[in-house]
Amino acid sequence: MNYLPAIEIEPTKNANAAVIWLHGLGASGDDFAAVVPALGLSNQSDLNIRFIFPHAPVIPISVNGGMSMPAWYDILSMDVERKINQQQFMQSAQQVKDLIERELDRGISSERIVIAGFSQGGAVAYEVALNFEQPLAGLMALSTYVASPSTLALKPCNAQLPVMICHGTEDNVVPESLGLLALEKLSSMGLKPEYKTYAMAHSVSPGQIKHITSFLKRVLSGSGD
């Protein structure tokens, strides 16, 4: 099988958990790979996490004048409820599911796998994590939105999925109103997401990194600050 190209950061011991982290529009897996040392998880004896940062394919983006860039799907309109290329969106979701299946083949339990995504990557992460047919460890949705409400469904095995939604109060790319809509959508499904905001734009902040560390420790080792 042809998997998405990705940066993989292995733990010092054999991996017993995995985090699959999707970048945003126009970026690459390198963006969040640099965050791993800041998480400070390498000194946790029970956390041997393999971090996987896939690279999206390079495709033309309609709202950027057809310019080609790394993207999980084309954005056709920047209305409040974005119009997207649904086929590309679902294809990206399937490719991420394939990465999860590869981790299962490598011996990682589904309950030790976290899906994370920023912006466009977060929209795909929502689709993948909630629809996955085995229980996952958690979902981190960073500065993102629900891109395909009609296909978003919660499988019973993930009815208790831990979810952390993070958003910048000064985000002018993905307004916080979209983060709140995602919170409302997931809550209506019976999930109980943590919702955290930061005085930042469409980015990542040191305070957010601390919350990400705490979340990963909690869902992968049962502890957290």
Image (cartoon, rainbow, N blue to C red):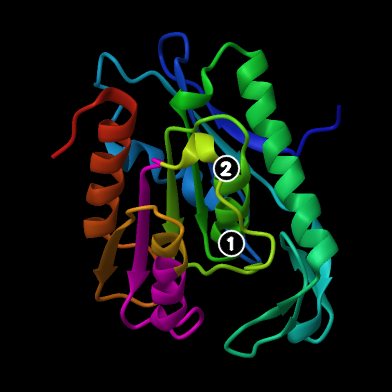
**Count of picture labels:** 2
Q: Is 72 displayed left or right of 146 in the figure?
A: right
* Residue 45 visible to the viewer: yes
Q: Is 93 displayed left or right of 165 in the figure?
A: right
The residue lying toward the viewer, choosing from 219 and 73, is 219
Q: Residue at x 57, y 42 (%)?
A: 155
Residue tagged 2: 155
Residue 164 highlighted magenta (yes or no):
yes
Q: Is 217 displayed left or right of 167 in the figure?
A: left
Vertical comparison of 203 with 103: above or below: below
Q: Amino acid at mark 2?
A: Lys
Of the image marks 1 and 2, the number of the one nearer the N terminus: 1
Element type where label 2 sits in the image: loop
* The N terminus lies in quadrant: top right
Q: Which residues are magenta?
A: 160-184
Say few, some or many: other residues with alpha carbon within 10 Å of mark 2 (under 14 / 14 to 19 / 20 or more): some
Vertical comparison of 2 with 160: above or below: above
Residue 101 highlighted magenta (yes or no):
no
Q: Residue at x 63, y 56 (%)?
A: 124
Residue 91, image x, y percentages: 81, 51
Residue extending farthest left:
225
Residue tagged 1: 123
The residue lying toward the viewer, choosing from 197 and 185, is 185
Q: Residue at x 82, y 60 (%)?
A: 88
